[in-house]
Image: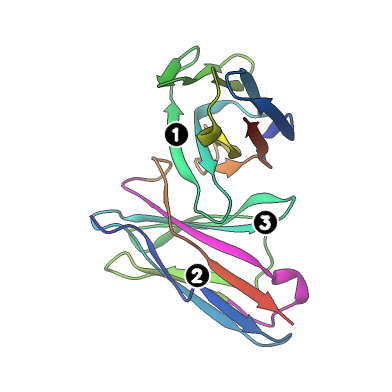
Amino acid sequence: QQPVQSPQAVILREGEDAVINCSSSKALYSVHWYRQKHGEAPVFLMILLKGGEQKGHEKISASFNEKKQQSSLYLTASQLSYSGTYFCGTVPFLDNDMRFGAGTRLTVKP
Amino acid sequence: KAGVTQTPRYLIKTRGQQVTLSCSPISGHRSVSWYQQTPGQGLQFLFEYFSETQRNKGNFPGRFSGRQFSNSRSEMNVSTLELGDSALYLCASSFYPTGELFFGEGSRLTVL
């Protein structure tokens, strides 16, 4: 079963912040985040393995709330290069395979 | 090191035909997953292979099949093509199942 991402799309100005949410109906073993730029393959951003874990990559970080089966991706002081579609991938404990959300299209404007 | 290679990159088929797509994973990666990507549907999981065994299969009809060879290369086959099969088919490899995925550029299939 696919995780649910929100919002579907967001438009930002350079320097603004954004939050992308991902939720699952199943107990999760891990959450992955990927970014796909137009016409390119998705690229791995980070993986979260523990409940409550937070990870960061430059100005992009994420949290994982194991109890709520939710993860959020935080983009701070956004740059033009952050534009793309962000996908969360969830791995439930019992299914042990990765399913992706429908994606969040992020557009950063000058 | 070389990334994930998918062939062919583009192909056009007609309804009723069949198609075979190939994926060469990153050297050392034994897990290969396939996804179908269409506008508005995101990435739909097709199947995953690890050490030549299909571990999981998504909710697709039996017309979609795949296999993995001893060198970890994988193929997927779609028989009796339908218009709705038009999509970008992405292959991803990882060192272990559910690990960090490395995606190929994809094979864009158009069914006329």
Q: Is residue A11 left or right of residue B48?
A: right
Q: Is residue B43 above or below residue A93?
A: below
Nearer the observer, B111 or B16: B111
Question: Is residue A86 at least partly visible in the picture?
Answer: yes
Over which residues does the magenta segment extend? Answer: B78-96
Q: Classify 10 Å Cα crowding around label 2: few (below 14), some (14-19), many (20 and above).
A: many
Amino acid marked by disc 3: Asn
Q: Residue at x 44, y 39 (%)?
A: A44
The quadrant in which residue A28 appears is top right
Q: Which residue is mark 1?
A: A45
Mark toward the viewer: 1 or 3: 1
Instruction: Identify the image quadrant of the N terminus of chain A.
Output: top right
Instruction: Identify the image quadrant of the C terminus of chain A.
Output: top right
Q: Secondary structure at mark 3?
A: loop
Nearer the observer, B57 or B33: B33
Q: Residue at x 64, y 29 (%)?
A: A26
